[in-house]
Each structure stands twice: as structure tokens, then as C-alpha cells.
Image (tube, rainbow, N blue to C red):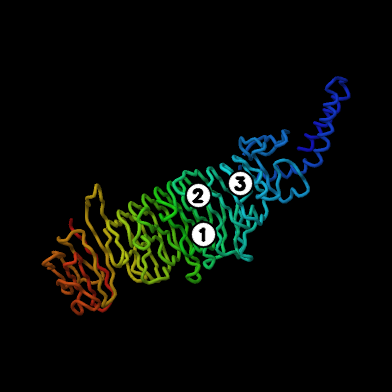
Amino acid sequence: MSTNYHSAIATGAAANAATFNDPLGDLDAAIAAEAVARAAAVDVVDDRVSTIIASSGTSSTEVVDSRGGYTALSDNLGDKYFRSDVLLVDAAFEGLSAAGRFQTIGAALAACTGGETIIVAPGIYTENVEIADDNVKLIGSGMPSYDSGTGRLVNGTIVRGYIDCNSHEGITVANLGVDLYGVNSVGALIPSQVTNVDLWQTFRDLVLLGNGNAALAHAIESNGGGHITFDNIYMRDWYHGLAILGNFVNASNIDCYSCSGTSIVVKSKTGSGNAHHVNISNVNMDGGTASYLVRAGPILIQSNDNSYSTKFVNVTNVTCRNAVNGVIQIDRLGDLGTITDCNFSNIISTGDLGIADIGDFNPEHGQRITFSNCHSVSRVSGYAFKIGGTGDADGIFVHGAVADGSGSGTVADPGLVFDVMEMNGLRYGVNRIGVTLADDIATSITPPAASGAFTISCGNDVGIYGLISYRAASSPFCATTGAGSDLNTTTGALANAGGTDVKYTVSAHTNGKIYLSNRKGASRTVILTFFT
């Protein structure tokens, strides 16, 4: 198509020069000669350009090329004009020189001054990509696929090296893959390394392949910066998947396979600042079926500096298979920083946790944390819900939870408030706590008030029931009304194998805790319903 066009330029200019003997004749002859000379060198490239742009995912009917001539293309480039701000990269350009044509991504980036779109042909580009200007768009010609035989990415546009955006504004990276198989300690994509700067970056339609647990690297490390969007990203075989350290970040349609350290981490820390207003949705986390080194790491909400906080985080629509360390973890690392006002909803986790003392939903720290419609089933080990014994979690609310009795149990070290609503600091409704204890095991819970009343019941033991009045303060008190034959009450702290033998014992203590001890000879799950 472009060959006919350039031939038409040459023929028309030559005819004009021969027919009209005017001062412009020499100019027309020069145009004809230039058109003929460049057609041979450029037309092959232009044909390749049509193919590249057609597969790049970007859309237009006619493109103005960087030499000022018109090349008709398929409807795939939108309303872009193909001038000097649209650069093409393809190894097939070897031996053919034309403006805006490059064999490597690095060469195209070196020609950028800001605002360019770089369209990269299918193929493998073994280079580290350093973006050095604002508003550069790096667009590949197709997401690659994973070849289980070679362990590498194949087809589409593949970069065998990292992509560093160097904290530039307005960057877009899309429709390509990064393959770092065999490379340790190097991440695939680095959007930002600055704090408190709105970057307005977009990353979409990406496949990122790492070197597994031992690589100790992130697929994506967004270390500061705000207003960043991640969409339709597949991360496979990383120690960490997506790291979000910044504000106003949206991540959706994320697929994490064998990201064993963490699948996603939202974190405030020294050097990165706060992590506020983060939305994460539509996530698949798959740990496969092999050793814990390739299991699914959790979505981790974390802080590590008292000067910064992690707040206003929404996580919704998540499925997880075979998590190594739970599906949701909340942790103030070193008891530093603040984590508040986070919401987790519509999350299903199934399979092995790998660690018996961990919960699928493990809010060890944090205030005003809500779990809605969260399911934990078929655990080989670990609990459904667990608050760590050394944590400072307060105001953890669970609505519509589903958990079976698999693994280590349903709830451990509970400070959880089930089926409640909190408005303006006041709790309304019924506070319900479920606790599973093995035989000769004791635990403690923090009741919603220092004194009051609650019912206790056990679905698999008709002898454990009653209405209990308590005071967990000075001069503690604990007594039952209408108690079942297998329920005992007392005061004071209870240790493992404490309480009355062959009974289930409930005790109030001066430290504000209610103690529970199971000595029934087998595991028991009880429901405590507090009236507030």
C-alpha cells in the first residue's frame, strides 16, 4: 500500500517537471528523485509499521508518518498522528534507517524529550529499560504467555530486563511482558522512588515473570508517589508481587501465582511516607500445590515508622488457594506506625496455610478494621481468624463470616467483634465471638465491656450452655444462670489444662479478660454472644 503511494509521488512529480517548464521544475525534479530514492529504503519498513501498530492495541484510520508522508493503516491507532512523537521499535529495522525507527527500546528512549509514544513490535528485547522523561508511553504489541516447558515467556513483546520509570509523571507501560527468569534481586517494574508527588501513571496488560522465592525481588515496587493505576497484571514466581507504598492507588484484575512472600503489600514506611486511599479489587492468588516456597503470600497491610500511617484501604473480591501465611495480614512492623480504617470484603480462601499458628484473616494490629463476607475453608493448618497475642488490634469487626472447623480451628486469641455495626464510635447490635479450642487448651478474649452478660452455647456438646454474668475488673465475678451440666464458672487466669476436668470452664479476671478452658477430652467450638 505504501509502495504504491511513494511511487505515485515519484511519478506525479516527474510528470509535473517534464510538462511545466517553469521555475519550479527543478524543485519538482528534486522531489521526484527524493521520492524514488527513499521509497526503496522506507516502504519495507512502513509495511512492517502497519503490522506493529495493528497489534499494539492503540486505534486510527490514517497515520501521518515522521517524514510527513501519509501511510494508510488499519483501524488500530485511534486519533494519534504518527509524527516525531510516535516512535517504533523492532529488531527487523536492522539496516534500514528512518526517523522514528529503532532496533532497541533504549535507543527510542534516548530520542525522547517527553510526551512520546513508543510502540514496540513483537519479539524479545534483552535490555534494561530506563525511562528518563515525563509522559512517555511504552506500548507493546501483545501480552506474552508462559511456556511451562521452558519456564519462559513466549510470543508478544518481551523485555528481558527491568523497566524503571524513575518517578516520572504521566508514564504508561502496557501490553507487554517482562521475563526475569534466572535473575535474582532484580524487580520487573519500578514506577516510583519518591514521596508526596502525584505521578498519574498507568500500568496495564502486563505479564511479569520472576525467578521464584529465592530471587527476593518484587514484580512491581511502587515506592512512593500518588495517583497510580495498575490493571490486568499477571505476576508469576516472585518473592513479592505488587508493593504499593503511596497514596491514591488503584489495583484491579491482578493475578498472582506463587508470589510466596507477599502477593500484594500496602505499606507506609521511612523513605516512602504514608499509604492512604488504596483500592484493590478482583484478585486471584494461587499457591499451586508444591512446597511452601511457592505458595501464595498474603495481602499484607503494614507500617514501620511512627511518623507515617497506612489508612483508608479497601480490598474486595479476592480468591486465594493455598496461602503460606494467610490471605490477609495486618502488621505494625516493630509495633511502629499506625494502621486504621481498612475494609476487606468478599474474600474466599481455601487450602493449606502452611503455618499452624497463623490465621487466614490475621489482624494482629490495627484499629477500625472490617471484614465482610469473608470465607476460610478446607485449611490443612492454621486458623480462620486470629489476632496475634502480642498485637494491639482494637475494633476488629466481622460481618457474615464463614469458617469451617478445619486446620487449627475457627478462631484463636479472639478480640474479634462479630456481626456488629459501629457508627460514631458507638457499637450497635450483638457482639458474637466464636472460639475453637482443642482439649486441655485455654485462651482469653477481651469482652466488649468490663462487665455485663453473655450467653454461651456449643453446637456439638449439649452440656455446654448458659447465661453468664461477669465482671472482668477489680473484685472479678463470673456466675451462670441455667447452666448446662458440662459448664463451670470461676475467677482468675486459666492456663492450659486449667479449669475443671471434663468440664468447659469460663473465668473472669482482673486484667479485663474472659478466660476459656476446654477439658472435655476433644475439641469444642463455642459461641459467646455479648449483650451491649
First of labels 3, 1 by sequence position = 3
Q: How dense is the environment of label 1, judged by Cα within 10 Å: few (below 14), some, or many (20 and up)?
A: many
Q: Quadrant of residue 484?
A: bottom left
Nearer to the camera, 299 or 216: 216
Front in this rendered view, residue 95 or 436: 95
Q: Which residue is mark 1?
A: 218
Mark closest to the chain's N terminus, 2 or 1: 1
In the picture, measured across the screen, residue 86 lies left or right of residue 446, that is: right
Q: Residue at x 19, y 76 (%)?
A: 499
Q: Does residue 243 appear in this view?
A: yes
Residue type at numbered disc 3: Ile
Is 526 left, or right, of 345 in this rendering?
A: left
Q: Position of residue 154 (x, y in %)?
A: 64, 58
Question: Dot 2 corresponds to which residue?
Answer: 230
At mark 3, the secondary structure is strand
Q: Amino acid at mark 2?
A: Phe
> How many C-alpha atoms fall within 10 Å of the one at disc 3: few (<14), some, or many (≥20)?
many
**As displayed, is residue 461 above or below residue 28?**
below
Residue linked to disc 3: 139
Tag 2's secondary structure? strand
Q: Identify the residue shown where x is 47% and y is 64%.
A: 261
Q: CA distance from mark 3 to mark 1?
A: 22 Å
Nearest to the observer: residue 257 or residue 410: 257
Crowding at dot 2, Cα within 10 Å, few <14 / some 14-19 / many 20+, comes out as many
- The quadrant in which the C terminus is found is bottom left
